Amino acid sequence: MSISVVMATYNGAAFIKEQIDSILSQLPDDSELIISDDGSTDNTIAIIKAYNDPCIRLIQNQQKKGAIGNFENGLQQASGDFIFLADQDDIWLPDKVNTCLQYLTNCDMVVADCSIVNQQLEVIQPSMFSLYQSKPGLIPNFIRNRYVGCCMAFRKDILAIALPFPKHIPQHDIWLGFVTDLFYTSCFIPQKLLLYRRHMGNASVTSQKSPFSLGKKLQFRFNTIRYLPLLLIRKNKHRQS
C-alpha cells in the first residue's frame, strides 16, 4: 500500500514550508510527494530543494500549464495506490493520512471536512461542510460542486478514467468528483483534517456566494457533461485491460 501526494505550486514561498512539513510528518516511508511547479519566480523552488528528501519529486514545467494542467502533470507521475491532493498553502492536521486510509478501505474517494482559516491561521469558518452543505451524490454535486481538491484522497484506479484531463473542464477537482460519482463510490467524512488557508494569492476562490455568473455556471456544467461519451469509452477500455 503506497501513497502519492500530488501538490501543484506557483509562487508559494510564503506558506509552502509549513505545508510540506505537515505532510512529511505523517507519510509512511514508501510514500512520494510529487510537486509540480508552474514556473515560480519566488523562493518556492529553493525551499523545496532545501529539504533534500528522497520522497520529494520536484517537476519543473518548461512551459506554463495553469492550475488544471499543473495538477494533471503531477497526477500523471503518481505511482501510489492511494492519491492525496495538496495545495501549497494549507496545513494538514496530524491524522489526515491515517484517517483517510481507514475510510478508503470501503470507498474509492474520501472528501474530508476542514476549517477555513485566514493568512494567520485564524478560523474564518469552522466547517467547510457546514458552509457548503456538502454531501455525496452525482446530482447534488452537479448542481453545486462540493469536491474540493485539497480535501480529497482516492484510489489510483480513478485516474485510469479521469486522465488525461479533457481540454475544457472547469476544474481538476470537479472533474475527479464527476468521474467518481459516475463510476465509483465516494464518502464525505465529518473529521476536519486540514486548515484551508484563504488569502489574496489563492488560485481558487472559496466563499458562500459564487463569483461566477449564471451563464458561466451553465457553461461549466456543459463542459463537464459533454465528455460523458469519452468517459464511457475509457471505462470500457479500463474494464478490458
Image (cartoon, rainbow, N blue to C red):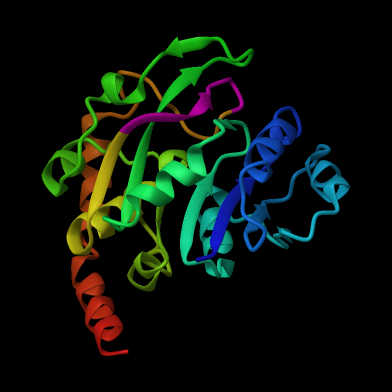
Q: Nearer the viewer, residue 139 or 183?
A: 183
User: Considering only vertical position in the picture, is 121 above or below 40?
Assistant: above
Q: Residue at x 46, y 60 (%)?
A: 82
Q: Examine the rendering and report whether any part of residue 170 can be seen.
A: no
Q: Position of residue 3 (x, y in %)?
A: 54, 59
Q: Residue at x 50, y 45 (%)?
A: 97
Q: Nearer the viewer, residue 183 or 228?
A: 183
Where are the magenta residues, as a range? 190-201
Q: Residue at x 70, y 35 (%)?
A: 16
| Prevailing secondary structure of the magenta residues | strand
Q: Position of residue 32 (x, y in %)?
A: 64, 59
Residue 68: in magenta span: no
Q: Position of residue 86 (x, y in %)?
A: 55, 44
User: Does residue 178 appear left or right of residue 64 in this picture?
Assistant: left
**Residue occupying the far left of the picture:** 139
Residue 191: in magenta span: yes
Q: Residue at x 27, y 39 (%)?
A: 188
Quarter occupied by the C terminus? bottom left
Q: Position of residue 74 (x, y in %)?
A: 58, 60
Q: Quadrant of residue 154?
A: bottom left
Q: Quadrant of residue 238?
A: bottom left
User: Considering only vertical position in the picture, is 4 above or below 201?
Assistant: below
Q: Examine the rendering and report whether any part of residue 89 can be seen.
A: yes
How many dots with numbers? Answer: 0
User: Considering only vertical position in the picture, is 182 above or below 123?
Assistant: below
User: Considering only vertical position in the picture, is 157 above or below 11?
Assistant: below
